[in-house]
Amino acid sequence: MSKTRETKHAPGQLIDKTESWQVVSHEVLAKAHIVALSQDVVYSPSGEAMVREMISHPGAVAIMALDEQGRIAVVHQYRHAVRMRLVEPPAGLLDVAGESALAAAQRELAEEAGLAADDWRVLVDFATSPGISDEVLRVYLARGLRSVPRPAGFEAHGEEVDMGLEWLPLSDAVDGVRAGLYHNVTFCMGSQALALALAEGAIDKLRPGDAPWPMRQRVLDAKQARSGGMVRDAAASGV
């Protein structure tokens, strides 16, 4: 039976930290349009050799757009992998070269919801499934909403054609998450984080929309190291 390592930390010091174990081999098994599947052989600090499969993903942003009536803008989008139509916030991939995370979020909000916002805050950053994927996602809070035309040249395709736009009371979203009615991780994380920030009066304590995104830069650095060099990424800078 393995022993659980118990370490005492000062208050506020038990946080996520950067750590990288030795990789002795890296093999790309398959590449697709959005993701790639690779296999690494990694040495643990104890010297154990481990084989780990990983899905490489470009990362994404999502927006909790909150109106003055306490409602959030949501879409109802078909997701083929789970064979369901899920309630989700406007969101999209970080797949435009040179585009910052904030600019990507602003573009996605205009494309999917026909909205712009005067006030942008970072609500939560997270890794969607770090045991198997390097996908990281930033959820924004957008307020001071107004209607705008879809960006020039934008055309809906695939699942986006009929996903629509609805306004859902935040209180209903929170209750629905607890009742197991909603399953999109971004929606669940974003609605709960927003409700908590409002309940604690902590909206003004949220990071600004252009706050740096260190975790994304670490992910990009690891990808570039595997391909032979380091680069800086506009989305990781936040601006």
Image (tube, helix red, strand yellow):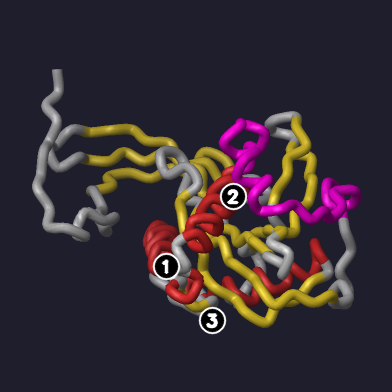
Query: Of residues 10 and 239, which is closer to you in this image?
Result: 10
Q: Residue 228, relative to residue 148: is it above or below?
A: above
Cα gap from disc 3 to disc 1, whole angstroms: 13 Å
What residue does disc 3 label? 239
Q: Residue 143, relative to residue 136: is it above or below?
A: below
**Would you identify the image quadrant in which residue 16 lies?**
bottom left
Question: Label 1 amino acid?
Answer: Gln
Q: Which mark is residue 186?
A: 2
Q: Which marked residue is nearer to the observer: mark 3 or mark 1?
A: 3
Q: Residue at x 78, y 51 (%)?
A: 75
**Would you identify the image quadrant in which residue 230 lies?**
bottom left
* 160 relative position to 21: left or right: right
Q: Position of residue 62 (x, y in %)?
A: 63, 60
Question: Label 3 amino acid?
Answer: Val
Query: Of residues 39 and 74, which is closer to you in this image?
Result: 74
* 99 relative position to 48: left or right: right
**Would you identify the image quadrant in which residue 15 lies?**
bottom left
Q: Which mark is residue 112?
A: none
What residue does disc 1 label? 217
Question: For residue 206: magenta?
Answer: no
For the magenta stretch, what is the residue range? 157-184
Q: Residue at x 87, y 52 (%)?
A: 164
Q: Earlier in the sequence, mark 3 or mark 1?
A: 1
Cα gap from disc 3 to disc 2, whole angstroms: 21 Å
Query: Of residues 170 and 106, which is closer to you in this image?
Result: 170
Query: Of residues 184 and 196, which is closer to you in this image?
Result: 196
Q: Residue at x 64, y 76 (%)?
A: 103
Q: Residue 53, relative to residue 15: is it above or below?
A: above
Q: Position of residue 232 (x, y in %)?
A: 45, 76
